[in-house]
Amino acid sequence: MDTSIVEQAHEYRSRLFPGFDSPLAVTDPEFSERFDRFAFGEVAHSDDLDDRTRLMAILAALVGCQGVEAYQAMAKGAFNVGVTPVEMKEIVYQAVPYLGLGRVLPFLHATNELLEHRLVDLPLEGQATTQVDARLEAGIQKQVDIFGEGMADFCESGPEETRHINRWLAANCFGDYYTRTGLDDAQREMITFCFLAAQGGCEPQLKSHVKGNMHVGNDKAFLIKVASQLVPYIGYPRCLNALRCIEEAAAEE
């Protein structure tokens, strides 16, 4: 056994969860040893991502794959390495237009429970920057900023009977969420990439958001690092699908 990897895994796990030993180390010691060695040793030390970026990506992916118990555990680690309460809340809020409230509500409750346990006063300071009557225009501008001028009239495109969905996408997804402070455009596109990769079945949208990531500075190499970090949490098939989308989008760009 490579003792250096074991030591790295132990040190990293201790940094995320100081003073806490997983009960799986007692009930499932072989599994716990192998998972920790892989996730906290091999994977966590495979690139130069900072801890905050890595944990934000993992939290977003766990929301995307509906891993609420794993989210509860990793959110504690994220808090311990400096992911702020505002950033945690913004990750969960932005998941709503991509996953729907039915799948996101348990994660909002889990985040609130963690923050209350850590004695963080709720509600947090507001991060909204748009008024209801201006959110459509602001959302369109945000779409243009991320995806290019071709999005300027997207909200009025398509068949008349479904055009309202495109308007909602601009006003709600982008006007209500992407315009918020707390995360910048690059961080929001990264977590959206993680939501889509983790839930699966959204490869056309995932590919579009790979391009959006590239437009805001998250290049191919960065996205490969992010996808690699998700392997222990969402599995190989969805990560391999994400890597294919990265390759195809990069070739088209």
Image: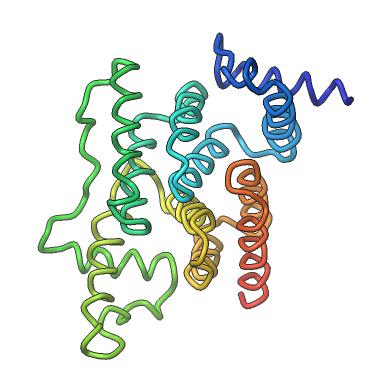
Q: Residue shown at 52%/43% (left/top)?
A: 57
Left or right, residue 37 beside residue 151: right
Please identify the quadrant where the C terminus is shown.
Answer: bottom right
Residue 114: give x, y in percent of width and height: 35, 24
Along the viewing direction, whichever of 103 and 60 lies nearer the viewer: 103
- Does residue 187 lie above or below 29 as drawn? below
Along the viewing direction, whichever of 64 and 29 lies nearer the viewer: 29
- Does residue 48 lie above or below 215 as drawn? above
Residue 198: give x, y in percent of width and height: 52, 53
Extreme-bottom residue of the structure? 159
Left or right, residue 193 beside residue 41: left
Along the viewing direction, whichever of 172 and 175 lies nearer the viewer: 172
Q: Quadrant of residue 162?
A: bottom left
Q: Residue shown at 70%/20% (left/top)?
A: 29
- Does residue 212 lie above or below 204 as drawn? above
Extreme-left residue of the structure? 133
Left or right, residue 4 beside residue 67: right
Residue 213: give x, y in percent of width and height: 52, 60
Q: Residue shown at 43%/65% (left/top)?
A: 146
Please identify the quadrant where the N terminus is shown.
Answer: top right
Q: Quadrant of residue 115?
A: top left
Q: Residue shown at 27%/78% (left/top)?
A: 155
Residue 234: give x, y in percent of width and height: 58, 48
